[in-house]
Image: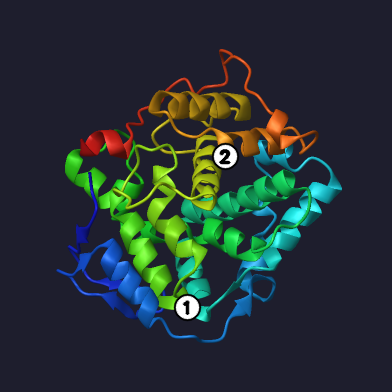
Amino acid sequence: MLDSATLQHDIVDGRGVLVARRGAVVSPAAIREAARRAPRGPRRLLADSFVAQDLRLPLLGASQEWLLRGPAAEAGTLRALRAVSLPGPLFDELSAVKLADPLRYAHALSTAALTARMLLAAEGAEPPGLPEAVAAGLLHDIGLRQVPVRIRQATGPLDAAEAREVAAHTLLGALYVASLLGEHPAVEVALGHHGWAGEGYPRLEAAASPLVAAVGVASAFSALTAPRPFRSGPYEPRAALDVLVREARESGADLAPLRMLLHALRGGEGSLGAVSFSEARKGGEPEVNRYRGVAAALR
């Protein structure tokens, strides 16, 4: 399983600034070194950036109709998103993502909104460090802009070489975020969000933290309930949850982040500890689905 990546081309950010040269090896050790050397520059609130005008985009999908029932849930989620604070270059990178890959930009916003709602529903109030956690959701897939367009937009299964290109986005994203934010939850999340169910990539040095797992679930649920080029349509929210629960049980993963998701889907009512999963129901899946997991293609 992938645990480092040798760059096949230069990595250039949204400003045109060189991040890493072709031939460099990106590994967890390299990411830690980038975090150690990161400058402490000024940051800007998301509320004062171009992203603020797009915050209602993730509230329009079918999954959000369940998660954001009621004005209080929506207001709390929007407040958490607006409180995110990032260096200017990361907003430039998000602008580049929006221009080059609107689908991924919408996914970033949706995952951030889902992360905020899951954490708010679990705590019943704003938990400490919420803006940093939501920033991690927003930036978790930032490395995907470095993956060739033909692979990002593939309509069928990936071969092993293409799967390695996709898998490397976790390392590339973590390196870039670390170079600007230093030690920050977004670095760990960018690196490990595909490992929440225990069988993702890259190979992690330790089990996924609760935040990494929560963002991983938010990202997976967001992806399943949104259009993708390799399937005929999105999953319905209930069917998407069933898929994630099945995968977690098959891998022996902790179901805690999925309980957080289901608790949020139920409006955050009652005790999180009392949440249990019912039997999977038929229906709600796309008629055509040509997806093959990246982890499976890497084996």
Above/below status of 148 relative to 277: below
Question: Can residue 135 be seen from the camera position used here?
Answer: yes
Residue 41, given in percent of the width and then of the height, sits at 51, 87
Which percent across, then down, holds residue 24? 18, 70
Colour mapping used in the image: rainbow
Mark 2 — residue? 257
Q: Is residue 268 above or below residue 107?
A: above
- The number of discs equals 2
Q: Foreground mark, 1 or 2? A: 2
Look at the image and tell me whether residue 100 can be seen: no
Q: CA distance from mark 1 to mark 2?
A: 31 Å
- Name the residue located 38 percent from the left edge and 38 percent from the top edge: 198
Nearer-the-camera pick, 121 or 107: 121
Q: Which residue is at a point 66% across and 53% down the rendered structure image?
A: 116
Determine the secondary structure under disc 2.
helix
Instruction: Judge from the rendering whether residue 228 lies leftward or rightward of residue 273; answer left or right.
Output: left
SS type, badge 1: helix
In the shown orientation, is residue 245 left or right of residue 76?
A: left
Q: Position of residue 3 (x, y in %)?
A: 24, 53
Judge the density around disc 1: few (<14), some (14-19), many (≥20) Cα neighbours within 10 Å. some
Image height of 150 relative to 17, above or below: above
**Residue 30 quadrant:** bottom left
Q: Which residue is mark 1?
A: 89
Which quarter of the image is occupied by the N terminus?
Answer: top left
